[in-house]
Image: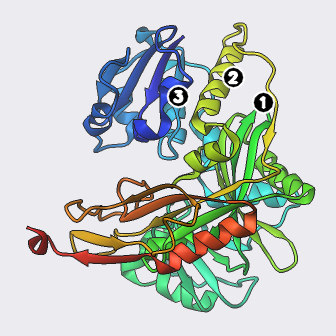
């Protein structure tokens, strides 16, 4: 099969060669110069470079055409998924189009689909339907309120207010009017946030693993706390809710990263993406289950495209892998994007080396430069760890304890020179 891969996530994270036989398939990677440069030197493939200044599909469509004979467009990044639909349409390749894929990006649309299936999601107001500066007639909740971009990621641009009135007062300021083009307010639902990761194949799960965040993605984005996660054994009730959410939104093939709030009385859908989870979800899942999410996803996507093309399906029967017993794994990433300083020094607690909990630990060295935008990549943060425990409570405790006791001291460049 001739495959065009929209290459945005670093190769070291996806490791395409583990699932994709580059000798059997004719593979082309397209991406910015930085991304193309991270491909292994000996990898059998074509390489296409785009500037990375305009929308991806616009730049890609300018250098490829139906005459090139591509049979599949593969996109594993959240930032490429819906744009891949535009590239497929340009090339005349079967597969999901932009309008079909937008529901995996648009937080209002996905919540409407979940609510239509009878599942609980936060009440919300789509600011795109509100005339700029106009008052909102009524808000069906009181108390803490979230303001967020509808198409955003990584908790960037998210704010928490004491009431809907305060949130709307913030939006009407001229400097904040971008939320009328891409924004929503929603009720704040109390409770721990779960993330559920795995792979769907034809509407059935190949893999499903549940975890609880330690701290929140929003606290991480603000730079106030590290972000961690600990796997746990899901009940049949939880599993049913998770799968109901995935099916309500329409995730049929590929990886998923679902976020759910453990509310005081019931589970509440938060959001979902049709891609692998960030931070160290991929290696922690593989350590726990032996399953590498991108490898499974690529296999699923190739099988799905083979069906669309009317060709025999590669591979045999697939069984579901559900995490039901220990050991359990977790991860932790420590933010550094909020520091004005260029570098940092990291100190880990004395108990950590002898704890038996460390699977992998990376700490930035004083000469490493901190990235100034929100990132969860282990090689771009002050510290990142994959941890383990005999039961879910043990791994949750070690992640929590490390998140509280690890120390990061920022340094200006001149101090280190």
Q: Which residue is mark 2?
A: 304
Q: How many residues crowd mark 1 within 10 Å: few (<14), some (14–19), many (20+)?
A: some
- Please report the residue visible at 41 percent of the width from the left and 77 percent of the height from the top: 176
Say which of 184 and 29 sits in front. 29
- Please report the residue visible at 23 percent of the width from the left and 68 percent of the height from the top: 343
- Please report the residue visible at 62 percent of the width from the left and 41 percent of the height from the top: 101
Instruction: State if disc 1 and disc 3 touch (CB < 8 Å).
Output: no
Q: Earlier in the sequence, mark 2 or mark 3?
A: 3
The x and y percentages for residue 353 are 48, 65
Vertical placement of 391 versus 319: above or below? Answer: below
The x and y percentages for residue 361 are 45, 57
The label number, if any, that marks residue 137 in the structure image: none
Outermost residue on the front side: it is 354
Outermost residue on the right side: it is 236
Q: Secondary structure at mark 2?
A: helix
Say which of 296 and 393 sits in front. 393
The x and y percentages for residue 228 are 57, 67
Q: Which residue is mark 1?
A: 202
Q: Secondary structure at mark 3?
A: strand
Instruction: State if disc 3 and disc 2 touch (CB < 8 Å).
Output: no
Q: Which residue is mark 3?
A: 74
Residue 304 in the figure: left or right of residue 375: right
Which quadrant of the figure contains the N terminus?
A: top right
- Please report the residue visible at 72 percent of the width from the left and 7 percent of the height from the top: 312
Measured in 3D between alpha carbons, the distance from the residue under mark 3 to the one under mark 1, in whole angstroms, is 17 Å
The x and y percentages for residue 180 are 50, 70
**Residue 252, picture quadrant:** top right
**Residue 106, picture quadrant:** bottom right
């Amino acid at each position: 099969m001739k495959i065009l891969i929209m290459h945005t996530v670093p190769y070291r994270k996806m490791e395409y060669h583990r699932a994709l036989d580059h000798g059997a398939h004719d593979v082309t990677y397209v991406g910015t110069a930085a991304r193309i440069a991270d491909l292994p030197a000996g990898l059998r493939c074509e390489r296409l470079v785009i500037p990375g200044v305009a929308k991806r599909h616009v730049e890609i469509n300018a250098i490829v055409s139906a005459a090139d004979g591509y049979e599949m467009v593969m996109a594993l990044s959240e930032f490429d998924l819906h744009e891949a639909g535009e590239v497929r349409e340009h090339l005349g390749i079967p597969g999901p189009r932009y309008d079909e894929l937008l529901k995996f990006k648009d937080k209002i649309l996905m919540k409407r689909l979940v609510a239509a299936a009878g599942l609980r999601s936060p009440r919300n107001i789509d600011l795109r339907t509100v005339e700029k500066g106009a008052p909102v007639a009524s808000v069906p909740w009181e108390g803490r309120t979230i303001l967020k971009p509808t198409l955003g990621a990584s908790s960037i641009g998210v704010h928490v207010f004491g009431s809907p009135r305060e949130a709307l007062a913030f939006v009407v300021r001229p400097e904040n009017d971008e939320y009328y083009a891409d924004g929503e307010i929603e009720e704040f639902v109390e409770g721990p946030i779960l993330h559920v990761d795995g792979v769907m194949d034809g509407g059935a799960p190949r893999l499903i693993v549940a975890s609880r965040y330690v701290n929140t993605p929003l606290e991480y984005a603000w730079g106030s706390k590290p972000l961690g996660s600990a796997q746990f054994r899901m009940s049949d009730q939880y599993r049913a809710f998770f799968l109901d959410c995935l099916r309500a939104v329409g995730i049929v093939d590929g990886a998923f990263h679902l976020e759910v709030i453990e509310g005081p009385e019931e589970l509440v859908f938060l959001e979902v993406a049709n891609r692998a989870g960030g931070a160290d979800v991929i290696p922690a899942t593989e350590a726990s289950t032996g399953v590498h999410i991108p490898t499974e996803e690529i296999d699923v996507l190739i099988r799905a495209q083979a069906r669309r093309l009317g060709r025999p399906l590669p591979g045999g029967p697939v069984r579901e892998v559900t995490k039901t017993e220990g050991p359990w794994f977790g991860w932790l990433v420590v933010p550094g994007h909020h520091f004005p300083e260029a570098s940092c020094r990291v100190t880990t607690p004395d108990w950590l080396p002898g704890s038996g909990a460390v699977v992998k630990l990376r700490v930035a060295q004083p000469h490493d430069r901190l990235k100034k935008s929100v990132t969860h990549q282990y090689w771009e943060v002050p510290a990142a760890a994959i941890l383990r425990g005999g039961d879910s409570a043990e791994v949750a405790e070690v992640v929590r304890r490390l998140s509280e006791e690890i120390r990061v001291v920022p340094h200006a460049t001149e101090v280190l020179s």
